[in-house]
Amino acid sequence: MKYLLKNLIIVFLVFLIISGFFTLLSGQAEKTGKISLSQLVEQINQEKINKINIEGDKLNIETKDNVKKEANKEREISLTESLKNYGVDPEKLKLVNIEIKEESQLLFWLGAVLPFFIPLLIIGFFLWYMFKGAQRGTMQAFSFGRSRAKLFSPQDGKNRVTFKDVAGLKEAKEELEEIVEFLKNPQKFTQLGAKIPKGVLLVGAPGTGKTLLARAVASEAGVPFFSVSGSEFIELFVGVGSARTRDLFQTAKKNAPALVFIDELDAIGRQRGVGLGGAHEEREQTLNQILVEMDGFEPNSGIILLAATNRPDVLDPALLRPGRFDRRIVLDLPDLKDREEILRIHSRGKPMAKNTNFTEIAERTPGFSGADLANIVNEASILAARRNKKEIDQDELRESIEKVLLGPERKSHILSKKEKEIAAYHEAGHALMNASLSHTDPVQKVSIIARGAAAGYTLKLPTEDRHLHSRSGFIDELAVLMGGYTAEKLVFDEITTGAANDLEKASDLARRLVTQYGMSEKLGPVTFGEREELGFMGREIMTAKNYSEEIALQIDKEVAQFIDNGFQTAKKTLIEKRKKLDQIAKELIKKETIERKEFERLMKRKVK
């Protein structure tokens, strides 16, 4: 449809130009004015004609009033004889200045040929355009099996990325420095009989810098970098993926030493034998070809395959065995120090205010990936531009954290007076429970301004990175989640749909405590349920029961008990601190937002 529309536009333009050309010619003829020979003779006899130019059978006439006119005579007879036949007065004719101009042969031939040549030219143009399109389609058909990998040259300074541009990931960079050293100086390893790994698998959560780190390896080593996504191997037609795999490795061998990077390896590297198509599935054929190619080149040939995935659990075991992907490097989420360094890297070239405190922003962003932190700095830049500021302030950075976590503020989402009071007590319940328990994180902000899908929110973030979570922390977290629900029931003797998300989170957490973490005192340190997944459907699709109906009943009772304990803890605490709950809620209704320092002062302030 796109190409048909393009062709129609071209045809329309061609005919528009041709019609414009002929309109111009006809317009000029109309402006000059044509007369017949009898009219010419009549005007000669009246002594109105000053000059006649003869050009072939065309007469260019100029009257004594300086008016231009045209007439045509018979080609075989002279002008004098033609005029005599029409009864011209010979004496009057002598008064007219008659000039004979040699007719242009070029104009003669153009006038004779163009009417026939222009249609042929148009037909020829369309035939050429059609053949060109057919040739393009033929070339695309022949190139269908070629690799779609993008080549990044080491001389490309614009897209150059080094290890200095990748913050954190100290252990991962140390592992990859060996790859760089081998590509620069392979003799150092080969003289000791060492074999460099054929493949390196980068494993980490989305946004942790897998692709960035792979490009940094190529830039540090100064070798060509071939980058391709796993999904680019697969097409509708059978055999295309295998052909592209062969072409990719052949191209890399010609440019050796070189790095080949396959992003999202799980798109083609999933475990075989679980798809709908069986052994003949196109994805499996592509994986088979990758395995063959990795066995086909020598360990020290100068070709190193890097791949990235965030789903190592679904990869085929044949990919992960020694001799293929020999080395697996895990990329963790950045810690506090790394987050601060990442923020500084992404703020380069941006006008940051003097009071910018990246340490505070890093403390507020535990669990954020490098991509999340880059997004925070970018959102802060957009906010500063929206406010017509010349510099990015700390306020924009703080607000961008909430925007990335919860979504933009919805100030147009105006609550009624009653709804605002309910939302205030709901969030005050969360905040008060969080401040009253010992195994919780400090409250950073409490707000009843809608963000994203939430009508209000209580933002609490840990002061340090955690890798292990305790049972006591989970029990307190359940009480905090039940704080909003309990506050609504205690104050208004009614519950609303505002607690739906809290109850969902509490139910999920309680079930994980029982079935996954072994934290139920009654059921003991046992996990329940087997997760199953099918390769062609992606993530897990069901949890198989490996326990009896009697155990299932006990699990349900334990989940309900965990949630009820959280509710009772919240109820007891909020009844004891009802005046403080009212104080926080009234402050929220008044100001709509309470920051951390203000909240801490509020908690220390005596209730009147």
Image (spheres, rainbow, N blue to C red):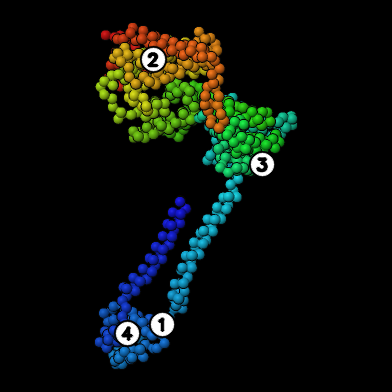
Q: Earlier in the sequence, mark 1 or mark 3?
A: 1
Q: Earlier in the sequence, mark 4 or mark 1?
A: 4
Front of the two marks 2 and 3: 2
Q: Check disc 3: other Cα within 10 Å, few if <14, some if 14-19, many if 20+.
A: some
Q: Earlier in the sequence, mark 4 or mark 2?
A: 4
- Cα distance in 3D space between marks 1 and 3: 74 Å
Residue type, numbered disc 4? Leu
Residue type, numbered disc 3? Lys
Camera sees residue 168: no
Front of the two marks 4 and 2: 2
Front of the two marks 2 and 1: 2
Q: Quadrant of residue 411?
A: top left
Q: Which residue is mark 1?
A: 56
| Mark 3: secondary structure | helix
Q: Are marks 2 and 1 in contact (CB under 8 Å)?
A: no
| Mark 1: secondary structure | loop
Q: With 367 as the anchor, is 95 left or right in this view?
A: left
104 or 140, which lies in front?
A: 140
